Image: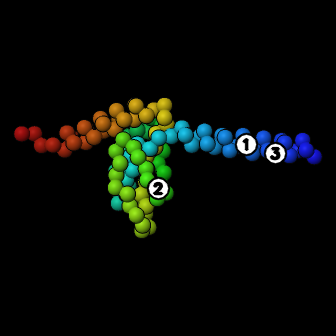
Amino acid sequence: MNVVWIIVGVSVFLIAAALIIRANRWKTVLTAPGNQADEIQDKHAYLHGRGIRSRLRELDGSSASGIVAGTMHTGGQNPGMKLQVHKEDFQRAKEALEEYTHVLHTSHSPLI
């Protein structure tokens, strides 16, 4: 009977450790309130198209930091979103988002 409890305890410990390690593999690079969700989704698609591992998560109300921090939405139906990238792709994501911003601003600028 003691062996069963030891196996259960070790299993629970391993599962908890795996969940903690898995959560630490992602870094938040951008947050946006609910009314700016389209912009963050476009950036997610841009990163995905460049082969950069990224994901979108709903803001949970806690403060989030990143490369660019948007304003936090406090209350209402849509709390906002955060864009996260795999920690190994963080530098590539930063460079890609800077390129995205540059292309976005220069493509809409009129020629003088």
The residue sitting at 68% across, 44% down in the picture is 16
Q: Mark on residue 8?
A: 3
Label 2 Cα neighbours within 10 Å, binned few <14 / some 14-19 / many ≥20: few
User: On the picture, is 18 further left or further right than 55?
Assistant: right
Residue 100: quadrant of the picture: top left
Q: Mark on residue 13?
A: 1
The quadrant of the rendering that contains the C terminus is: top left
- Give the mark nearest the N terminus, 2 or 1: 1
Residue 10: quadrant of the picture: top right
User: On the picture, is 22 further left or further right than 70?
Assistant: right
> Can residue 58 be seen?
yes
Label 1 Cα neighbours within 10 Å, binned few <14 / some 14-19 / many ≥20: few
Q: What secondary structure is found at the residue carrying circle 3?
A: helix
User: Given the current orientation, which residue lies at the most extreme bottom position?
Assistant: 76
Q: Position of residue 37 (x, y in %)?
A: 38, 55
The residue sitting at 19% across, 44% down in the picture is 108
Label 3 Cα neighbours within 10 Å, binned few <14 / some 14-19 / many ≥20: few
Q: Amino acid at mark 3?
A: Val
Q: What secondary structure is found at the residue carrying circle 1?
A: helix
User: On the picture, is 57 further left or further right than 3?
Assistant: left
Q: Which residue is mark 2?
A: 62
Q: Position of residue 2 (x, y in %)?
A: 91, 44
